Amino acid sequence: MAGRKQVLIILLFFLFVLEGTIMPWIIPDALLPRIGYNFVYIAILFVTVYYHRHTALVLGIIFGLLHDVVFYGHMIGPYSFSMGLAAYLLGLIFKSQRTTMPVMMMVAILGSLLFDTILFFIYKLFQLNHVSYDWALVEYMIPTVFIHFIFALIIYVPLRKQLDKLSRHRSLSKDKT
């Protein structure tokens, strides 16, 4: 079953590459500064709900650090910290293998807002951000939540099936030991 974990990591890496290569071509230039698309983070939210929060924490830290290095070079660590912390906190709140689609969509919305809020205040703390939270909420957080919600709807069925298989195997291997 190690193959399923490798498939999950390959999927996350594929989403990471998709964010940097294809998405800037799809989104119009006028909306590009206003819309953030972090598809890896949405997939990590699925991992935190349907698999395990500790795995999501590690994946959030690793892929967040990858985001910090490749895309956002102001500081090393804000994306890593934000992704890991938000995924772990949401894993504490929504800890069920049988979470329904509406609840998962709510997790995607809350997770997107939590991630952007943590990131906003980290940048505010280090004085890299000079706008108000209200402005940031209207200008880029809400459009980003909408994009994340649409993406979560698209990947819900295939990703949930894969994570159910992964967690089923994990529970079977625990029962054997």
Image (cartoon, rainbow, N blue to C red):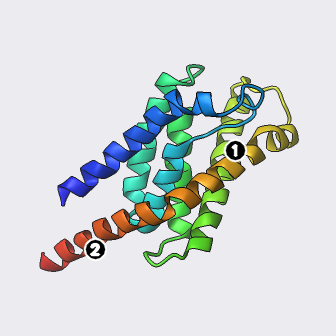
Q: Residue 173: horizontal and vertical position, in percent?
A: 17, 72
Separation (CA) of disc 2 from disc 1: 33 Å
Which residue is nearer to you in this view: 93 or 33?
33
Label 1's element? helix
For the point 38% across and 47% down, the residue is 58
- Near mark 1 (Cα within 10 A), the count class, few <14, some 14-19 or many ≥20, is many
User: Relative to 103, is 8 above or below?
Assistant: above
- Identity of the amino acid at label 2? Arg
Q: Earlier in the sequence, mark 2 or mark 1?
A: 1
- Visible in this render: residue 139? yes
What residue appears at the point 48 percent right and 72 percent down from the top-left corner? 95
Left or right relative to 6: residue 71 = right
Taking the spot 67% from the left edge, 33% from the top edge, the residue there is 27
Determine which quarter of the picture holds residue 174.
bottom left
Who's the residue at 53% across and 31% down the image? 22
The one nearer the camera, 47 or 101, is 101
Measured as percent of width and height from the top left, residue 55 is found at: 37, 55
The amino acid type, in three-letter code, at marker 1 is Thr
State the image quarter where residue 130 is shown: top right
Q: Secondary structure at mark 2?
A: helix
Looking at the figure, which quarter contains the C terminus? bottom left
Of 139 and 113, the residue lying toward us: 139
Q: Determine if residue 65 is in view.
A: no
- Residue 127, image x, y percentages: 74, 24
The numbered mark at residue 168 is 2
Q: Which residue is mark 1?
A: 144
- Residue 21 screen position, x and y as percent: 50, 27
Quadrant of the frame with the N terminus: bottom left
Question: Would you place residue 53 above or below residue 42 in this image?
Answer: below
